[in-house]
Image (spheres, grey):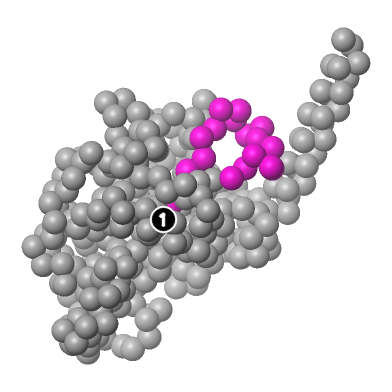
Amino acid sequence: MNPNATEFMPGRRNGPDGGLEALPTSTADMELAKTPAGAAAAAVHASALPGAARRSLHNSPIIQPSRLNVKSASEIEAISKNSALNAAAAAYVPQRTLARVVLTQPSPLALAPSEDPAKDNIEMMLDDLWCLFYLPTTLGENIKEEDYNPTLVFRVDSIPTFWRVVNNVAAPSELQLSTLYLFRDGIDPKWEDPANRDGGIVKVKATAAQVDEAWELLLCRTIGDSWSPSVRETVNGVVLKVRERAYWLELWVTKNSSALQKDLAELWHPILGASFATTYLTHAMMQERSHAAAALAAEKQKRNRRRY
């Protein structure tokens, strides 16, 4: 990704007749949609779309260059704080430094405003809202449950917003030890969330030479909702884990299936080659392992105290 990019070219797979239903990109756009002019523009676009069911539309917007919208600092903070997920979390926006990403201050990379915001509002919306979370990791996987609290970074509801976030976050191979989560709005990246409880995780290991492209493809496939029909509704979120010896890409799903495995092979085999292999673990299994590891660590700590 070029962090200095000022435009992008979204793609579509099924020709110029596809599209996405209009959604507001911000609270300001929601107010615009209430006006007669905004309502008329949305109605014209909706009449041109094939089919009426919102969830049946899974194509990308029309292929054409579009300038990215720029949200003010106050608007960014409002979007983050008003998310259904962890609304009390501090509102963070990525900032790229020369070497590392620092998730503390608004990005200095200001992209040019769209020449036609109304057109972007209609054609560039996603089917679902997605929330990006960040968790710094200094102890590998040995993190206590009470300390596991990913911070809400940004709420992504349009393609311009998506690329604005992606272009301002360092590539996985440049990140420090950490975990990034991209989940549907309303679903916490935690085992205990009702939407996750009965599902599991599909894990794939990648090297530093593979992870950047593999993660970008996973993000685009997820944001574009371009999984197979039987897979779309099972994907709750995707995860990137940056660890000392490896990178892990995860899908949190409500169930595993042959269709999901086929989609992943199609997505990643060209990049990972012979090293491509998936592992599926239910959240119940992960919890059991976590509790067992915590009990073992507590017992070890107790024995060490007795020695001294």
User: What residue span does the magenta drawing correspond to?
Assistant: 131-149
Q: Is residue 175 visible?
A: yes
Residue 144 on the magenta span: yes
Residue 18: percent from the left, percent from the top? Answer: 24, 77
Q: Residue at x 37, y 81 (%)?
A: 54
Q: Residue at x 19, y 58 (%)?
A: 69
In this view of the protein, which residue sits in the foreground, 255 or 125? 125
224 vs 57: above or below: above
In this view of the protein, which residue sits in the foreground, 50 or 163? 163
Q: Is residue 266 visible?
A: no
Q: Which residue is mark 1?
A: 80
Extreme residue toward the top, this view:
308
Residue 103: percent from the left, percent from the top? Answer: 39, 38
Which element is circle 1 on? helix
118 vs 67: above or below: below
Q: Quadrant of residue 172?
A: top left
Q: Quadrant of residue 301?
A: top right
10 Å neighbourhood of mark 1: few (<14), some, or many (≥20)? many
Residue 248: percent from the left, percent from the top? Answer: 51, 39
Q: Residue at x 13, y 56 (%)?
A: 113
In this view of the protein, which residue sits in the foreground, 72 or 300? 72
Q: Quadrant of the N terminus?
A: top left
Residue 274: percent from the left, percent from the top? Answer: 45, 39
Q: Amino acid at mark 1?
A: Ser
Q: Quadrant of the C terminus?
A: top right
Q: How many marks?
A: 1
232 vs 145: above or below: below
Q: Quadrant of residue 192?
A: bottom right
Q: Residue at x 27, y 26 (%)?
A: 98
Residue 192 on the magenta span: no
